[in-house]
Amino acid sequence: MTTLYLDIETLPAADESREALAYLYARKCEKAERNGQEPEDFAQFVRHTALDGAFGRLLCIGYALDDGPTQALVGEEREMLAAFWALARGVGLFVGHNVMEFDLPFLYQRSVVQQVRPSVKLSFARYKSAPIYDTMHEWTHWGRARVGLEHLALALGIPTPKTGIDGSQVFAFYQAGRVEEIVAYCQRDVETTRAVYKRLRFMG
């Protein structure tokens, strides 16, 4: 059985989505006003789409197959998705940190938007460790706590992957043209996820 370790880095919506987002933002402001709340500003609203598979977009997909080298898919989003699903055809286990709630749903959602048919239909049933093994949920035993990859890695004596950058800085690095550093960071997350997985499975 082939195991695929993965991590993604994402960006806010592209300019072509601004009209739709402006409409959604206006609706959100109306709701906030009715509830006597102060809405976030539009720029912040757009930045938050980096976590939304409907409007956010992929910057890169980091991955490793079994004990092979960590690699990354980078470039045009539709091509990245097609390449990812081609890789996924022979995979029996998908491993990631918070991959149940974020990475894999985001990949599926972007695939629908980009009209790239996934090669596999994964079950997202909770309380299972296959075909998706989520290291965060396996650590918490599906409790409510959300434990970051860095936190868990350091607890297990594994070096942090966050040297010089963390997820909150990805868009700033992208704006500064530092894409190679983001991709390298994504690949470190994949390597760390693999190391955490092996520790959780008592694999040495």
Image: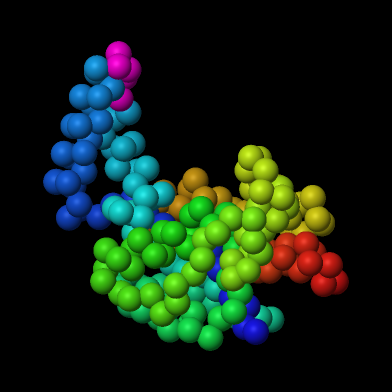
201 vs 181, nearest the viewer: 201
Q: Quadrant of the N terminus?
A: bottom right
> How is the rendered protein coloured?
rainbow
158 and 30: which is toward the camera? 30
Q: Is residue 82 visible?
A: yes
Kindly identify the residue that appears in the image at 41 percent across and 59 percent down: 106
Q: Main secondary structure of the magenta part?
A: loop
What percent of the width, then of the height, locates residue 129? 66, 64
Rendered-image quadrant of the C terminus: bottom right
| Residue 62 covered by magenta stretch | no
Q: Which residues are magenta?
A: 35-39
Q: In the picture provided, is 58 more to the left or to the right than 29? A: right
Query: Residue 65 in the image: x percent, y percent?
Result: 60, 80
Instruction: Reply above or below: 202 against 13.
Output: below
Q: Is the residue 74 above or below the residue 99 in the image?
A: below
Left or right: 1 as drawn, with respect to 109: right
x and y percentages locating residue 152 in the rendered image? 73, 51
Is 90 left or right of 150, judged from the image as shown? left
Residue drawn where x is 20% and y is 24% of the image? 30
Number of numbered discs on residues: 0
The residue drawn where x is 44% and y is 72% is: 121
Q: Residue at x 35, y 61 (%)?
A: 109
Q: Position of residue 39 (x, y in %)?
A: 30, 25
Could you say which quadrant of the image residue 117 lies in? Answer: bottom left
Q: Quadrant of residue 34?
A: top left
Q: In this orientation, does residue 182 appear? A: no
In the image, farthest residue toward the top = 36
